[in-house]
Amino acid sequence: MFFSLCVCIAGIKWQDRIPNTDVLRTCGISGIEAFLLQARFQWIGHVMRMPSTRIQKQVFCGQLVRGKRLPGGRHKRYKDGLKQNLKICGISPNELNSAQLARASWQSRCHAIDDFEATRVGAIKTKWEARKTATIRTGQWTCDRCGRVSESRIGLYVLTGSTTDDETRR
């Protein structure tokens, strides 16, 4: 809904076939991944600034005394995903453990998401350009079994099936 509203406000029609990254850049907003990362980082900063007596911080920072994980592989915890996202954005996970987690300094560190968004958009554009500039193979396809020539790959597939049928009939 929100994306459709942005497209409408920017005056872009669906028929224009403009990539999502260009639409977001035109509207001056970042993608949903960056938005969710920023919300996650802000919430974690809020939890880490809480006193140690609060239940939310005890649950997030606590360890189980006993118990074990199910066999067959590790299940990803919230903390594991958070550490991975911190590394992607260039923030050290040790910064969360520091006792002096000031609100202003953490908010400035959370703006590293802009760098994440820029690299994400760059990777998407690189893949898009590689896909658009890829050479499409045109020409003739030759059957390995009978030597017949086909104009398309699907024709070669049909031809291969028909040569197999011919050989089984004989």
Image (cartoon, rainbow, N blue to C red):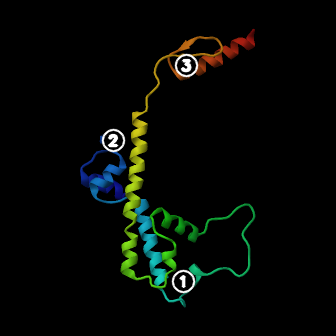
As shown in the figure, which amino acid type bears the numbered disc 1? Lys
* Mark sitting earlier along the chain (2/3): 2
Q: Name the residue: 39% across, 50% down.
A: 122
69 to 118, vertically: above or below: below
Label 1, label 2: how many angstroms apart (C-alpha)? Answer: 47 Å
Check disc 2 and report its element: helix, strand or loop: loop
Instruction: Pick whichever of labels 1 and 2 is earlier in the sequence.
Output: 2
Q: Nearer the viewer, residue 87 or 39?
A: 87
The alpha-carbon separation of the residues under discs 2 and 3 comes to 31 Å
Quarter of the image with the N terminus in it: bottom left
Residue highlighted by disc 3: 155
Decide which of tag 3 and tag 1 comes sooner along the chain.
Answer: 1
Q: How many marks?
A: 3
- Image marks 3 and 1: residues in contact by CB distance under 8 Å: no
Residue extending farthest to the bottom is 53
Secondary structure category for the residue under label 1: helix
Can you give x and y, in whole percent of width and height, for residue 67 in the image? 74, 76
Q: Would you name the residue on which mark 1 appears?
A: 57
Label 3 environment density (alpha carbons within 10 Å; few <14, some 14–19, many ≥20): some
